[in-house]
Image (cartoon, rainbow, N blue to C red):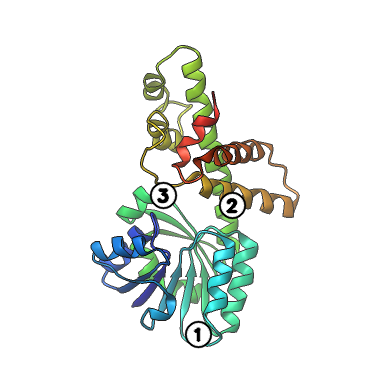
Amino acid sequence: MNVTFIGIGAIGLPMALQIKRAGHEVTGVDLSSRACELARESGLAAVSSLAAAPAADVVVAMVATPQQLASLVESVGTRLDAQTWIIMSTVGPDAVREQGERLRAAGARVVDAPVTGGTARARTGQLVIFASGARTDIDAVRPVLDAMGSVRVTGASLGDGQAIKVVNQHLCSVHIVAAAEALSLARALGLDPGAVLELVEKGAAGSWMLSDRGPRMLQGTDVTVTSSINIFVKDSDLVAEAANSCGAHVPLLAIANARYREAAQEGLGLRDDSRVIETWR
């Protein structure tokens, strides 16, 4: 398949490379000249605008925010016949429904397919993909989706995948903050946080986020960024909005959201999300 992959940042680039390794023709698109440079160094063709990309059977959207997705869809025009768009960004159910309908009105088929697993699993093609939409549309792009990870079909309607991702990001948001608080507690008790991490992470108190983010929490501010504080400000905001829209009570999410916002206000927005630990003094 000819694939255009929009958003070749920290997680998008390894996803696009997995599609290329599966034998598809892939062109990356990103406004960042540095992102395009890194893509080319990795052997992926890259351009700075969708208009500059060759005609595609499949367009993957991996932009950061609902606003970016809306701007992207607005820019593509009204003639997208025979093209399938896969929206893999975490943008919330409402955004994917609204923009998906705009794409459909222009003649495209649309699959809602947010992912979880982070950059580590993106590099190995082991992401979990929450796919929703018409089954025929999902089946048509399975060769592309399967290259990036394990596909879980979550529903027939656009937004079903995003709704699952909202629940996923609720847990991720809370688990990261819980890990930071626990390691801060260990330090306050006069313990070696690194030793405590090693002792508890494989027991009943362990979590994937504790094992993944914990070691980075024990490093300095300049730890390599795999997912930024700003991403979790955005994602926890999306969870809060979705919960509010359906009347769900999420007090733990509110606490986590406040921590990410505090970290961003302290100038840590572009730092790794593990640096939320710096909001504990």
- Of marks 3 and 1, which one's residue comes earlier in the chain? 1
Amino acid bearing label 3:
Gly
- Between the C-alphas of marks 3 and 1, the distance is 30 Å
- Between the C-alphas of marks 2 and 1, the distance is 29 Å
- Of marks 2 and 1, which one's residue comes earlier in the chain? 1
Q: Residue at x 72, y 47 (%)?
A: 248
Q: Is residue 42 visible?
A: no
Amino acid bearing label 1:
Leu
Q: Which residue is mark 2?
A: 166
Image coordinates for residue 55, horizontal then vertical, percent: 38, 83
- Between the C-alphas of marks 2 and 3, the distance is 15 Å
Q: Is residue 215 above or below residue 200?
A: below
Image coordinates for residue 157, horizontal then vertical, percent: 60, 68
Q: Nearer the viewer, residue 262 or 128?
A: 262
Q: Secondary structure at mark 1?
A: loop
Q: Nearer the viewer, residue 22 or 237?
A: 237
Image coordinates for residue 167, horizontal then vertical, percent: 59, 49
Q: Residues within 10 Å of mark 1 (few under 14, many from 20)?
A: some
Pair 2/1: label in front: 1
Q: Residue at x 43, y 74 (%)?
A: 59
Q: Residues within 10 Å of mark 2 (few under 14, many from 20)?
A: many
Q: Which residue is mark 3?
A: 118
**Is 223 displayed left or right of 182 in the figure?**
left
Q: Residue at x 33, y 58 (%)?
A: 14
Q: Which residue is mark 1?
A: 80
Q: Is residue 177 visible?
A: yes
Residue 129 picture quarter:
bottom left
Q: Quadrant of the C terminus?
A: top right
